[in-house]
Amino acid sequence: MIPLDLEGKVALVTGVGDDFSFAWHIAKGLQAAGARLVLACNPWFISIVENILVHEGYADARVLPYGRGALAVEKVFPCDVLGPAHLRALRGPLPTPPDIVSGRADSSSGQLSR
């Protein structure tokens, strides 16, 4: 069992481009710890990420660590994350404000956290 409990938390992970990216593996770790996932991807990568999430050929890439099942994402948003302003623009479409923000943009301002 993963020694971190994120049950009931929502995680926004930016920068997912494929199943080899650091962000992909961060998302898997967060979900293995119990977090619900929302991804923000560069618009050029949306179709790639959506394909990985549903295509049977990528089933192994969706397996979570610690035997926690398979990756399930609530929503994939197009977002070219160039800084906090771009993350704030996601505030409206997000189903709920995220508790955790992971990615290249500076999330230290707390703009998206509760």
Image (cartoon, rainbow, N blue to C red):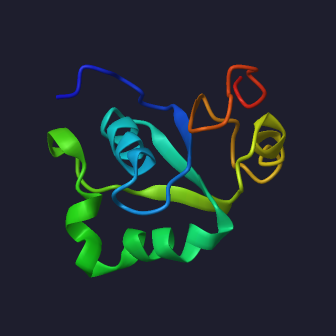
Residue 11 lies, in percent from the top left, at 54, 38
Q: Quadrant of residue 80?
A: bottom right
Position above or below: 48 against 110 = below
Relative depth, front residue between 81 and 2: 81
Q: Which corner quadrant holds the C terminus?
A: top right
Image side of residue 57 versus residue 82, left or right: left
Give the side of residue 30 with respect to residue 13, left or right.
Answer: left
Residue shown at the point (79%, 43%) measured from the top left: 91
Which image quadrant for residue 59?
bottom left
* Nearest to the observer: residue 60 or residue 22: 22
Q: How many marks?
A: 0
In the displayed structure, does residue 55 sit left or right of residue 38? left
State the image coordinates of residue 61 (x, y, percent, origin top left): 26, 62
To which quarter of the image does residue 5 belong?
top left
Residue at horizontal 45 percent and vertical 46 percent from the top: 23
The N terminus - image quarter: top left
Give the camera-side residue of 37 and 80. 80
Residue that appears at 23% across and 52% down: 69
Q: Is residue 10 left or right of residue 89?
A: left
